[in-house]
Image: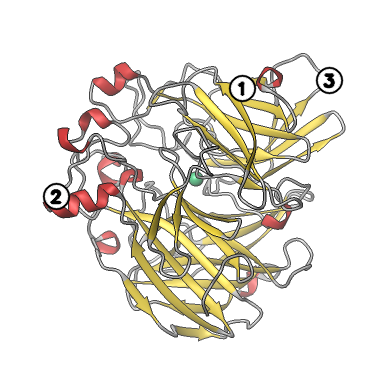
Amino acid sequence: VAAQASNVRSGFAAPKRFEADVEDCDVVGEIPTEIHGAFVRVGGEWFYPPKFADDAPLHADGYVSSFRFHKGKVRYKGRWIRTARFLSNLERGRQRFGYYRNRFTDDDDVRHLDGSVLNTAPIAHARKLFALKEDTLAHELDPNTLALKGSCDFDGAYKSQTFTAHPKIDAATGEMFAFGYEATGPASNDLFLYVIDRHGSVTREVRIKLPYVSMAHDMALTERHILFPFGGYVTSMTRLREGKVHWGWDRTLPSYIGMLPRDGEAKDIRWFRGPERGMLHTFNARSESNRVILEAPFMDSNLFPFFPAVDGSAWDPHKARARIRRVTFDLNSNDDRWQEEILFSFPVVDLARIDTRYMGHPSRFGFAGFHDPARPFQGTHGGIVPGPPTNSYGRFDFSTGTFTSYFAGPTCALQECCFVPRRPGAPEGDGYLIGTASNFAEMRTELIIADAQRLDEGDVARVVLPFRSDAQIHGIWVDASELPFVV
Ligand SMILES: [Fe+2]
């Protein structure tokens, strides 16, 4: 039931299928004129229904949208990411691609095409905008038209077949740390790490073998180390030949966090082991003398009901809830375990955000959505993960263990938030929290803009779209100086 609910195509999740431009959007409240740049979002919608009704919604066609801020006004643009899969389906007028990352289930005559949907995350680096999905290379987008330009192998220096949706850009050096897993092909346990300098040139490659093939979705960076968390998800060529969705969940396997010194080689990686854990996104990490500390919203088990357990057991919605944890590694100890502490008592959405000017350096605040059960809700919703609506954004202070929150209203569910600094040089966390809300009463999408230091006072402005926009997976804030925007 949960798996079917995740591909809902009615109500707020009914197919939209259009592209859109809205000049000078309607605004409730006043847009702070100091916000100058773009909120770029990537997500997915099935342009044609999936070939298999229980396929992972993570396999929906990529859609990119941007809210461009300039002098207190906002312009919206939304475009399909016209991948080889999208164009091939459009030509035949139906879905020709099978289960999530299982090419054996595609129509015979499309298996040679790149089947990626590029629906996971955008990133801006070296004055280029990319759409990312962890099953293929980074693909460049035109930052003004949002048109897909093509795949990028960084002048031939990027050898992995895949590129993570969550590279980390060191705020001090501008270097991008990126990796690909299943780097040499489906079900391979190769992970290749790359350092790409601020001009877009690959300066370093490290080829690593994972303890087992799994979904290494995100990473974390400190001033001295690189962390690779993963666990539970399994795949194999046998599984793929059997015609199954790419991932299963094996609760008997340990979770792992690989720790590589920034200047280390493959032999220098140290694998720490933990219990069953769902480990997808991270906030940030830091190295403090002989310890490494990571903050992340990890789950006790499998987040995704559409990646079934290999032992046939039912998906457990309670174990799928993310909690903000502090994970500490003692580098002096020979123990291969980590210490773990839950910092806040209630579950959050596992989409973890920070003030990215502190990426890879010590930071204090994390931002995430959550469901506040004390708040009223009047509506229905159909997100990709079944559960109560995300009605609040939190600013979590990891140094004091306290938080403040923003409530979106009784008819709204929030998508992932994003932090916008108030101005260059503003202190950490001084700025705005932005993110889209699905307003079920009005059947439209609204972009929330709240003061990150006064979340409890409500939003300072809402940009109102006259339609339901796409389901976002991840979004980023891009300052106007970062990309060659045409005003
Ligand atoms: Fe992600």
Q: Earlier in the sequence, mark 2 or mark 1?
A: 2
Which residue sits at x=67%, y=55%? 356
Q: Amino acid at mark 2?
A: Arg
- Proximity of marks 2 and 1: CB atoms separated by less than 8 Å: no
Please state the horizontal and vertical placement of residue 92, each as a whole percent of the image. Answer: 12, 50
Number of marks in the image? 3
- Proximity of marks 3 and 2: CB atoms separated by less than 8 Å: no
Please state the horizontal and vertical placement of residue 95, each as a whole percent of the image. Answer: 17, 46
Query: Mark 2 falls on what kind of element?
Result: loop
The quadrant of the image that shows the N terminus is: top left
Which residue sits at x=43%, y=57%? 42
In the image, taking residue 415 as reference, residue 106 lies left or right, namely left
What is the spatial separation of the Cα atoms under label 3 and label 2, in whole angstroms? 57 Å
Mark 2 — residue?
94
Mark 3 — residue?
332
Q: Amino acid at mark 3?
A: Asn
Q: Earlier in the sequence, mark 3 or mark 2?
A: 2
* Residue 393 in view in this figure: yes
Vertical comparison of 189 with 90: above or below: above
Mark 1 — residue?
274
Query: Looking at the image, which is closer to me, 396 or 54?
Result: 54
Kindly identify which numbered label has been placed on residue 29.
none
In the image, taking residue 397 as reference, residue 165 lies left or right, namely left
Query: Mark 3 falls on what kind of element?
Result: loop
